[in-house]
Image (tube, coloured by chain):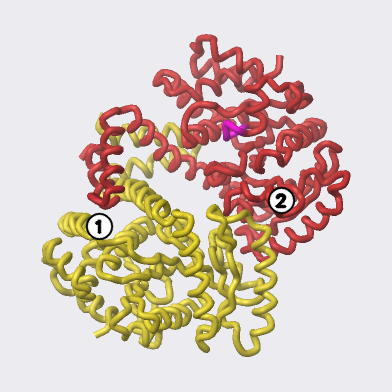
Chain colours: A yellow, B red
């Protein structure tokens, strides 16, 4: 049974394991328990939430031993075939990749929800790989919270490469950028229409641009695009660790260029280790998670209390009609919320 | 007496005007009252804060009638000479520019604190211009809050172009980007060392790149840089409103290229008006302000209560030693803070 179908069946069952039981299953590498535990993470019920927090505290000391890689690109760029080819390559190399999606419209989510079994066919069958679609519920904040937590559980379960997929058009990339070590942008040759969908700022976040579908009639255009992007990246501000973002060609269908991509990624991690910045980077990820989590939990608390939601709507109205400045409105809200 | 020196003297005086008195002075265009009112905005005392909020509510309906322009660039790029030349040009055109600085290390702040009267000499003497250094106190969040509020007061006082200066190396640019209509990046020719200091992501935020010091021996290199950046910007994702970020040459010392910069900026505002997005953009700025203000006020409340600060430090310690996951730590904090 593939991880995806085990997850889908699970939704209908009752969840009643204790944090310790989930923990034991996860540490044994049991993907079925892992899938159930992630569903608990994603749940909004108070009972599930307290189990989830207990479980996270247990897993944290066993987490962190992975390479966390963000993969983004607009729909149509070939994300699912790339992840299929890349994930299968990693499995062949003896790795255990976990693939997580952040946006509801990501390729793996679409694939699983629609039951489109042609997507990531071989990867989803591999026992060394774990594929988890994004939660369809909730706000972006909630989704990214669940993704951070899911990374910890996957790592505690022994997965050593975490691929986090986003669609490159929303607000999720900045959040994802703060939870991964390496950020890969998938693009197509010809800097025209296909760029329209990408949000500004994402190109400069990329540690590597991979030009996908560099095959058939597309080869010449892809080589030209590679040169152009290389030139452009030289004009970009330098990476904080001295890393120079690279551009690489790839044909996911022909499985060409995949090894090169992996080589570039590993050389990045070698740089981080040489400079002793890997630990610092992970510590920064924990702090970012803490701050993001505070904001998210405040938002959830507010939306759980109808009186606060009503107040916020009233305040937003008064801001737009210029009766209240946003500073005054925020002052009113905060003093209603906080214990003095 | 220049606005800068009036501000510096003011720090020592008592502030005891009512919101209404400040409001009346501001609406008369009295820059001395405006300077005093901004000092009240920047103050952390509860009494000043409530006067500030009252004043903001009064000014808001009279604000908004300006072009808000962010100007960023690393130290050495010539920000103060550019703003001097640009601001003087605007005054000649019949405009009333206000210049605000966000970062303590910005050129106008340095100039005023060190009493370096050669900086923005003619602009600071003009009665049509207002120059306000950034508050030296406080966190970035606090500074950017004060900047948003200062914009409102300056607009209510009749200033029709607000230039917000940042140094392009910190976190302030994203905040500033959310409070201005147009974002201008100052650079130098030769994409080498001088780019090192700029934070990634800023180039893609720019609506216009101005290559400064395009004079003397630097002219050829500047023209080449302009071509290169133009090519690179073509590879960038398109602007949400269909605006194609431009690259322009400028010599602030020789006052060359300044008019061209202004022409580009006005054509951007024409585009916004043609597409009816100016109002939407201002409404977005108000919402961004509200959310930023909630976060900022929560932070201030927490730092005002020693028990919360102690708790946060304990939680951060436990996160770094992996005793607590950031989600659990955030849960503990939020439930201590909020009225249930």
Q: CA distance from mark 1 to mark 2?
A: 47 Å
- Residue at x 29%, y 50% (from the top left corner): B326
Left or right: A284 with respect to B204?
Answer: left
Which quadrant of the structure image shows residue A210? bottom right
- Residue at x 66%, y 32% (from the top left corner): B107
Give the residues drawn in magenta, as a range: B101-105
B134 to A76, vertically: above or below = above
Task: Give the image location of residue B271, x and y in percent.
Answer: 70, 53
Secondary structure of residue under mark 2: strand
- Residue at x 32%, y 44% (from the top left corner): A310
Which quadrant of the structure image shows residue A194? bottom right
Task: Give the image location of residue A273, x and y in percent.
Answer: 44, 59
Quadrant where the image shows the C terminus of chain B: top left
Identify residue for label 2.
Answer: B209
- Answer few, some or many: residues within 10 Å of disc 2's Cα (few below 14, many 20 plus, some between 14 and 19): many
Chain letter of disc 2?
B
Residue A61: which numbered mark, if any?
A: 1
Which quadrant of the structure image shows residue B241? bottom right
- Residue at x 23%, y 70% (from the top left corner): A34
């Amino acid at each position: 049974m593939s991880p995806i179908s085990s997850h889908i069946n699970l939704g209908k069952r009752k969840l009643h394991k204790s944090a310790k039981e989930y923990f034991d299953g996860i540490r044994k590498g049991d993907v079925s328990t892992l899938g159930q535990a992630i569903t608990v993470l994603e749940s909004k019920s108070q009972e599930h939430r307290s189990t989830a927090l207990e479980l996270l505290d247990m897993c944290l000391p066993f987490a962190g031993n992975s390479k966390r890689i963000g993969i983004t690109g607009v729909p149509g760029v070939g994300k699912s075939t790339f992840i299929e080819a890349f994930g299968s390559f990693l499995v062949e190399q003896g790795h255990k990749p976990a693939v997580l999606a952040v946006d509801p419209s990501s390729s793996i989510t679409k694939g699983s929800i629609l039951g489109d079994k042609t997507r990531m066919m071989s990867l989803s069958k591999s026992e060394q790989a774990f594929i988890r679609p994004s939660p369809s519920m909730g706000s972006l904040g909630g989704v990214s919270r669940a993704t951070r937590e899911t990374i910890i559980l996957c790592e505690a379960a022994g997965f050593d490469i975490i691929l986090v997929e986003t669609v490159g058009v929303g607000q999720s990339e900045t959040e994802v950028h703060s939870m991964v070590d390496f950020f890969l942008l998938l693009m197509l040759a010809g800097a025209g229409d296909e760029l329209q969908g990408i949000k500004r700022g994402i190109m400069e976040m990329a540690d590597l641009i991979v030009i996908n579908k560099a095959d058939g009639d597309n080869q010449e255009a892809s080589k030209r695009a590679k040169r152009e992007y290389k030139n452009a990246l030289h004009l970009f501000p330098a990476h904080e660790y001295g890393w120079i973002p690279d551009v690489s060609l790839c044909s996911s269908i022909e499985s060409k260029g995949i090894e090169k991509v992996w080589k570039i990624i590993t050389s990045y991690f070698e740089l981080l280790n040489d400079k002793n910045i890997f630990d610092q980077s992970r510590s920064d990820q924990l702090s970012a998670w803490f701050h993001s989590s505070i904001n998210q939990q405040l938002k959830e608390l507010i939306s759980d209390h109808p009186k606060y939601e009503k107040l916020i709507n009233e305040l937003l109205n008064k801001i737009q009609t210029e009766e209240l400045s946003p500073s005054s409105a925020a002052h009113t809200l905060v003093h209603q919320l906080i214990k003095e």
